Image (spheres, rainbow, N blue to C red):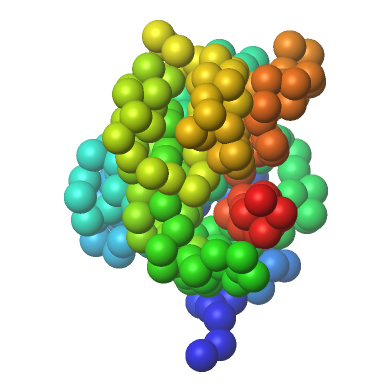
Amino acid sequence: MSRISTDDLHILLVEPSPMQRKIIMHQLEDEHVLAIDAVGTHAEAVELIERLHPDLIISALHYPDGSADQLLQYVRSRPALSDTPFMLISSENRREQLEIFKQSGVVAILPKPFTRVQLGAALNATLDLLDPQDLDLEMFDVDSLRVMVVDDSRMARRHILRVLENLGIRHIVEAGDGREAIEKLQREVVDLVVTDYNMPEVNGAELADFIRHSEMHAHLPILMVTSEAQDAHLRNISQSGVDALADKPFEPDTVKQLLVRLLDRH
Protein backbone atom coordinates (compact mmCIF):
# COMPACT_ATOMS: atom_id res chain seq x y z
CA MET A 1 0.00 0.00 0.00
CA SER A 2 1.38 3.41 -0.96
CA ARG A 3 1.99 6.06 1.68
CA ILE A 4 -0.15 9.14 1.98
CA SER A 5 1.37 12.37 0.67
CA THR A 6 0.93 16.09 1.19
CA ASP A 7 -1.77 16.28 -1.45
CA ASP A 8 -3.88 13.96 0.73
CA LEU A 9 -3.77 16.38 3.67
CA HIS A 10 -6.63 18.61 4.76
CA ILE A 11 -5.12 21.54 6.66
CA LEU A 12 -6.71 24.23 8.81
CA LEU A 13 -4.66 27.45 8.92
CA VAL A 14 -5.40 29.87 11.76
CA GLU A 15 -3.77 33.24 11.01
CA PRO A 16 -5.34 36.65 11.77
CA SER A 17 -3.31 38.56 9.18
CA PRO A 18 -4.81 38.30 5.65
CA MET A 19 -1.37 38.95 4.16
CA GLN A 20 0.28 36.22 6.26
CA ARG A 21 -2.57 33.82 5.44
CA LYS A 22 -1.99 34.40 1.73
CA ILE A 23 1.78 33.89 2.05
CA ILE A 24 1.47 30.69 4.09
CA MET A 25 -1.23 29.26 1.84
CA HIS A 26 1.00 29.90 -1.17
CA GLN A 27 3.89 28.11 0.57
CA LEU A 28 1.63 25.16 1.39
CA GLU A 29 0.46 24.99 -2.20
CA ASP A 30 4.12 24.89 -3.28
CA GLU A 31 4.37 21.74 -1.12
CA HIS A 32 1.42 20.24 -3.03
CA VAL A 33 -1.14 20.74 -0.27
CA LEU A 34 -4.47 21.01 -2.06
CA ALA A 35 -7.08 21.24 0.72
CA ILE A 36 -6.59 24.30 2.93
CA ASP A 37 -9.16 26.12 5.04
CA ALA A 38 -7.98 29.45 6.47
CA VAL A 39 -9.55 31.45 9.31
CA GLY A 40 -8.46 34.38 11.47
CA THR A 41 -10.08 33.81 14.87
CA HIS A 42 -10.35 31.23 17.64
CA ALA A 43 -14.14 31.00 17.23
CA GLU A 44 -13.87 30.33 13.49
CA ALA A 45 -11.17 27.73 14.11
CA VAL A 46 -13.25 25.83 16.69
CA GLU A 47 -16.27 25.77 14.39
CA LEU A 48 -14.27 24.38 11.47
CA ILE A 49 -12.35 21.88 13.62
CA GLU A 50 -15.57 20.41 15.01
CA ARG A 51 -17.16 20.26 11.57
CA LEU A 52 -14.28 19.16 9.36
CA HIS A 53 -11.77 17.35 11.63
CA PRO A 54 -8.67 18.50 9.70
CA ASP A 55 -5.56 16.33 9.39
CA LEU A 56 -3.32 19.16 10.60
CA ILE A 57 -3.84 22.50 12.36
CA ILE A 58 -1.31 25.24 11.59
CA SER A 59 -1.65 28.22 13.88
CA ALA A 60 -0.21 31.65 14.60
CA LEU A 61 0.47 32.40 18.27
CA HIS A 62 -2.13 35.15 18.83
CA TYR A 63 -5.62 35.95 17.46
CA PRO A 64 -8.04 38.78 18.24
CA ASP A 65 -10.13 36.48 20.44
CA GLY A 66 -7.60 34.05 21.82
CA SER A 67 -4.26 32.34 21.36
CA ALA A 68 -2.72 29.17 20.01
CA ASP A 69 -2.23 27.65 23.46
CA GLN A 70 -5.97 28.01 24.14
CA LEU A 71 -6.80 26.39 20.82
CA LEU A 72 -4.29 23.61 21.46
CA GLN A 73 -5.75 22.94 24.91
CA TYR A 74 -9.22 22.80 23.36
CA VAL A 75 -8.12 20.29 20.73
CA ARG A 76 -6.28 18.10 23.23
CA SER A 77 -9.33 18.06 25.54
CA ARG A 78 -11.67 16.66 22.86
CA PRO A 79 -11.41 12.85 22.58
CA ALA A 80 -12.28 12.83 18.87
CA LEU A 81 -9.69 15.52 18.11
CA SER A 82 -6.97 15.02 20.71
CA ASP A 83 -4.48 13.33 18.38
CA THR A 84 -4.78 15.96 15.63
CA PRO A 85 -1.27 17.15 14.70
CA PHE A 86 -0.73 20.82 15.63
CA MET A 87 1.93 23.12 14.16
CA LEU A 88 2.82 26.55 15.55
CA ILE A 89 4.14 29.38 13.38
CA SER A 90 5.49 32.30 15.41
CA SER A 91 8.19 34.95 15.57
CA GLU A 92 8.36 34.33 19.35
CA ASN A 93 11.74 32.96 20.43
CA ARG A 94 11.56 33.15 24.22
CA ARG A 95 11.74 29.59 25.54
CA GLU A 96 9.27 30.17 28.36
CA GLN A 97 6.65 31.32 25.85
CA LEU A 98 7.12 28.25 23.68
CA GLU A 99 7.51 25.64 26.42
CA ILE A 100 3.78 24.85 26.64
CA PHE A 101 3.81 23.88 22.97
CA LYS A 102 6.94 21.78 23.31
CA GLN A 103 5.37 19.93 26.25
CA SER A 104 2.07 19.42 24.43
CA GLY A 105 3.38 17.28 21.61
CA VAL A 106 3.19 19.74 18.73
CA VAL A 107 4.52 18.38 15.48
CA ALA A 108 6.65 21.48 14.80
CA ILE A 109 7.34 25.06 15.83
CA LEU A 110 8.24 27.15 12.78
CA PRO A 111 9.67 30.67 12.87
CA LYS A 112 8.31 33.62 10.96
CA PRO A 113 9.50 33.67 8.25
CA PHE A 114 10.21 29.97 7.73
CA THR A 115 12.04 28.26 4.91
CA ARG A 116 10.69 25.72 2.46
CA VAL A 117 12.99 23.12 4.04
CA GLN A 118 11.51 23.79 7.49
CA LEU A 119 7.95 23.56 6.19
CA GLY A 120 8.71 20.38 4.25
CA ALA A 121 10.21 18.74 7.33
CA ALA A 122 7.18 19.68 9.42
CA LEU A 123 4.76 18.31 6.82
CA ASN A 124 6.78 15.08 6.62
CA ALA A 125 6.58 14.78 10.40
CA THR A 126 2.80 15.11 10.10
CA LEU A 127 2.67 12.37 7.48
CA ASP A 128 4.74 10.11 9.76
CA LEU A 129 2.16 10.59 12.52
CA LEU A 130 -0.80 9.94 10.24
CA ASP A 131 0.67 7.02 8.30
CA PRO A 132 2.25 4.39 10.62
CA GLN A 133 5.42 2.64 9.46
CA ASP A 134 6.82 -0.20 11.58
CA LEU A 135 10.43 -0.24 12.72
CA ASP A 136 12.72 -2.57 10.79
CA LEU A 137 15.14 -4.03 13.34
CA GLU A 138 17.67 -6.81 12.97
CA MET A 139 18.09 -7.56 16.67
CA PHE A 140 14.53 -7.19 17.97
CA ASP A 141 11.05 -8.38 17.16
CA VAL A 142 9.16 -5.06 17.27
CA ASP A 143 5.96 -6.75 18.46
CA SER A 144 7.71 -7.90 21.63
CA LEU A 145 9.81 -4.77 22.22
CA ARG A 146 9.16 -3.25 25.67
CA VAL A 147 9.65 0.49 26.13
CA MET A 148 9.37 2.73 29.19
CA VAL A 149 8.31 6.34 28.52
CA VAL A 150 9.10 8.84 31.30
CA ASP A 151 7.74 12.40 31.17
CA ASP A 152 5.92 14.57 33.70
CA SER A 153 3.74 16.07 30.93
CA ARG A 154 0.79 13.79 30.16
CA MET A 155 0.36 15.37 26.72
CA ALA A 156 4.04 14.94 25.90
CA ARG A 157 3.85 11.28 26.96
CA ARG A 158 0.80 10.82 24.77
CA HIS A 159 2.64 12.25 21.78
CA ILE A 160 5.66 10.01 22.35
CA LEU A 161 3.37 7.00 22.80
CA ARG A 162 1.66 7.75 19.52
CA VAL A 163 4.98 7.95 17.69
CA LEU A 164 6.14 4.65 19.22
CA GLU A 165 2.83 2.91 18.53
CA ASN A 166 2.98 4.09 14.92
CA LEU A 167 6.35 2.34 14.68
CA GLY A 168 4.70 -0.94 15.71
CA ILE A 169 5.69 -0.86 19.40
CA ARG A 170 2.84 -2.20 21.52
CA HIS A 171 4.31 -2.87 24.97
CA ILE A 172 4.80 0.51 26.65
CA VAL A 173 5.16 1.35 30.35
CA GLU A 174 4.49 4.96 31.41
CA ALA A 175 6.02 6.90 34.29
CA GLY A 176 5.33 10.49 35.35
CA ASP A 177 8.85 11.25 36.58
CA GLY A 178 12.20 9.65 37.33
CA ARG A 179 11.18 8.48 40.79
CA GLU A 180 8.16 6.61 39.44
CA ALA A 181 10.33 5.18 36.66
CA ILE A 182 12.85 3.81 39.18
CA GLU A 183 10.02 2.21 41.17
CA LYS A 184 8.56 0.58 38.06
CA LEU A 185 11.96 -0.64 36.88
CA GLN A 186 12.11 -2.76 40.04
CA ARG A 187 9.22 -4.86 38.75
CA GLU A 188 9.09 -4.22 34.98
CA VAL A 189 11.44 -5.65 32.34
CA VAL A 190 12.02 -3.22 29.47
CA ASP A 191 14.31 -3.04 26.44
CA LEU A 192 14.52 0.75 26.09
CA VAL A 193 13.92 3.88 28.18
CA VAL A 194 12.68 7.10 26.54
CA THR A 195 12.83 9.92 29.07
CA ASP A 196 12.34 13.65 29.42
CA TYR A 197 15.14 15.63 31.04
CA ASN A 198 13.45 18.32 33.14
CA MET A 199 11.18 16.54 35.66
CA PRO A 200 10.34 16.95 39.36
CA GLU A 201 11.61 14.58 42.04
CA VAL A 202 14.17 12.75 39.87
CA ASN A 203 15.16 14.29 36.52
CA GLY A 204 16.28 12.53 33.36
CA ALA A 205 20.00 12.76 34.09
CA GLU A 206 19.49 11.30 37.58
CA LEU A 207 17.36 8.51 36.14
CA ALA A 208 20.07 7.74 33.58
CA ASP A 209 22.66 7.68 36.36
CA PHE A 210 20.55 5.21 38.34
CA ILE A 211 20.16 2.95 35.31
CA ARG A 212 23.86 2.97 34.49
CA HIS A 213 24.78 2.04 38.07
CA SER A 214 22.21 -0.74 38.32
CA GLU A 215 23.41 -4.28 37.70
CA MET A 216 19.98 -5.24 36.41
CA HIS A 217 19.44 -2.27 34.07
CA ALA A 218 22.89 -0.93 33.13
CA HIS A 219 22.61 -2.37 29.62
CA LEU A 220 19.44 -0.46 28.72
CA PRO A 221 19.67 2.06 25.86
CA ILE A 222 18.38 5.50 26.89
CA LEU A 223 16.88 8.08 24.55
CA MET A 224 16.36 11.53 26.08
CA VAL A 225 13.62 13.65 24.50
CA THR A 226 13.84 17.21 25.80
CA SER A 227 13.12 20.84 24.99
CA GLU A 228 16.57 21.70 26.36
CA ALA A 229 18.71 19.56 24.09
CA GLN A 230 20.68 22.55 22.83
CA ASP A 231 21.41 24.07 26.25
CA ALA A 232 25.03 24.25 27.36
CA HIS A 233 24.44 22.20 30.51
CA LEU A 234 23.22 19.29 28.38
CA ARG A 235 26.11 19.17 25.95
CA ASN A 236 27.87 16.58 28.08
CA ILE A 237 24.72 14.70 29.06
CA SER A 238 26.09 11.54 27.43
CA GLN A 239 28.48 11.35 30.35
CA SER A 240 25.52 10.42 32.55
CA GLY A 241 24.79 7.45 30.35
CA VAL A 242 22.29 8.81 27.81
CA ASP A 243 22.78 7.18 24.41
CA ALA A 244 20.96 9.76 22.26
CA LEU A 245 19.15 13.10 22.46
CA ALA A 246 16.11 14.31 20.53
CA ASP A 247 14.63 17.80 20.62
CA LYS A 248 11.05 18.66 21.51
CA PRO A 249 9.25 18.92 19.21
CA PHE A 250 10.86 16.04 17.35
CA GLU A 251 10.32 14.58 13.91
CA PRO A 252 9.02 10.99 14.16
CA ASP A 253 11.46 9.90 11.45
CA THR A 254 14.35 11.23 13.56
CA VAL A 255 13.19 9.14 16.53
CA LYS A 256 12.78 6.14 14.24
CA GLN A 257 16.37 6.47 13.03
CA LEU A 258 17.65 6.90 16.58
CA LEU A 259 15.78 3.82 17.78
CA VAL A 260 17.13 1.69 14.93
CA ARG A 261 20.67 2.82 15.79
CA LEU A 262 20.25 2.34 19.55
CA LEU A 263 18.48 -1.01 19.51
CA ASP A 264 20.50 -2.70 16.80
CA ARG A 265 23.80 -1.87 18.54
CA HIS A 266 22.76 -3.12 22.02
How many callouts does the rendering have? 0
Residue found 20% across the figure and 50% down from its top:
79
Q: Would residue 39 appear left or right of 224 to someone viewing this image? A: left
Residue 227 in view: no
- Residue 220, horizontal then vertical, whole percent: 56, 40
Q: Which residue is more in the foreground, 89 or 248?
A: 248
Q: Residue furthest front?
A: 215
Q: Would residue 110 appear left or right of 65 to someone viewing this image? A: right
Residue 144, above or below 251: below
Q: Would residue 18 appear left or right of 175 to someone viewing this image? A: right
Residue found 34% across the figure and 29% down from its top:
186
- Residue 8, horizontal then vertical, whole percent: 51, 77
Residue 186, above or below 89: above
- Image quadrant where residue 52 sits: bottom left
Q: Which residue is more in the foreground, 120 or 153?
A: 153
- Image quadrant where residue 249 sits: top right
Residue found 79% across the figure and 48% down from its top:
115
Residue 250 in view: yes
Q: Residue furthest left?
A: 79
- Residue 218, horizontal then vertical, whole percent: 58, 32
Residue 222, above or below 256: above
- Image quadrant where residue 30 sits: bottom right
Residue found 38% across the figure and 32% down from its top:
185
- Residue 248, horizontal then vertical, whole percent: 59, 35
